[in-house]
Amino acid sequence: MASVSVDDKIEISVLRDEGQSLGLALRGFPTGVLRVDKVLPEGLVNEWKKEHPQCDLKQGMYVESVNGFVDAPPQLYVVLLLLLRNINLVLSKNQPAMSAPDTQSDREKGEMIRAKINAPSGVRHDLNLYFVDSLVIVIDVSEGPIAEWNQQHPDKAISVGDRLVYVNGKGGDRLSENMDQSGDVALTFQRGGSVLFDASDTLSEQIVDEIPSMVWDRASDECFGQSCTICLEEFEDGEAVRRLPCKHCYHQHCIKKWLTTKSTVCPVCACAADLKPCHH
């Protein structure tokens, strides 16, 4: 167990054994804050408290972050504290400010993990997810499509507590209607940072620039179609086009604007633009 105490904040990092209680009674308020109501005699937090008498952990402190998530609804904090074994909890003596950030740059975006997963019966059915209000949380990675992805992509592994924010580039109010998408689906998970409810995901210019480009040749079978479906103009032999993994091609400036401002998927078939090839 480890801790850090700075001014009016306490950071607690603990590892919970299976079946072990955290021993922390929390109370949520309509204003959207979560407060420590009581530290129970039996539990991991009370053990931590005895080992760190210099840290003034007491009733009335507010939850500021859980495992890097900040500006989150109390429901998300509670679910993470129930599910996770490795817990990093920051408590503050001061009530967190409830005003929302004005711009994307003001938010802590955290780590975004993108994956392409095959869900034969749909995302909602095949993935081990927990739904609370508008939040969708990963609760098990030991089996199913996520386990297969993690085995094949250990550098982009999805963890318990990660939050599903986009399905095929759609999030916010449109996330729920995309939960029944089946087959190969592009998913984006958030780990830590401010809880985002943006309607659409986008790619950075750097990622778009890494998508392969080619010289258009009308006689080649490297692309589906003969025209850019964004601007509707036909390609001319010899001009540079960008080829997505699904084999749909676009003018470089057209697809760059689309992927950096509108979506992360092909505008024709909704295959992920920055992941492995889709199968049609």
Image: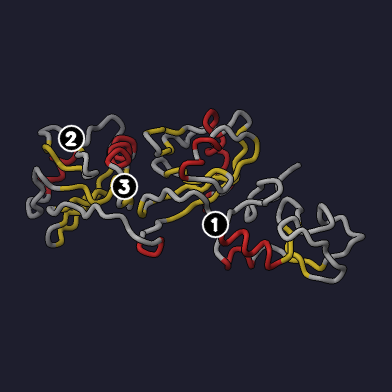
Sequence-first disc among 3 and 2: 2
Q: SS at mark 1?
A: loop
Please rate how many residues cluster around mark 1, counting C-alpha atoms within 10 Å: few if below 14, some from 14 to 19, many from 20.
some
Q: Is residue 196 above or below residue 250?
A: above
Q: List the residue tagged with mark 2.
A: 23
Q: Quadrant of residue 212?
A: bottom right
Q: Quadrant of residue 205?
A: bottom right
Give how far across and how far down residue 262 sits, in percent: 58, 56
* Most foreground residue, 169 or 189: 169
Give how far across and how far down residue 104 sits, in percent: 41, 61
Sequence-first disc among 3 and 1: 3
Q: SS at mark 2?
A: loop
The way the protein has been coloured in the rendering is secondary structure
Report the amino acid beneath label 1.
Thr
Q: Is residue 193 above or below residue 80?
A: below
The residue at the point 37 percent across, 49 percent down is 195
Q: Indicate which disc residue 120 carries.
A: none
Report the amino acid beneath label 3.
Ala
Q: Indicate which disc residue 72 carries.
A: 3
Tell me if 235 is positioned left or right of 207 in this view: right
Q: List the residue tagged with mark 1.
A: 202
* Most foreground residue, 81 or 199: 199
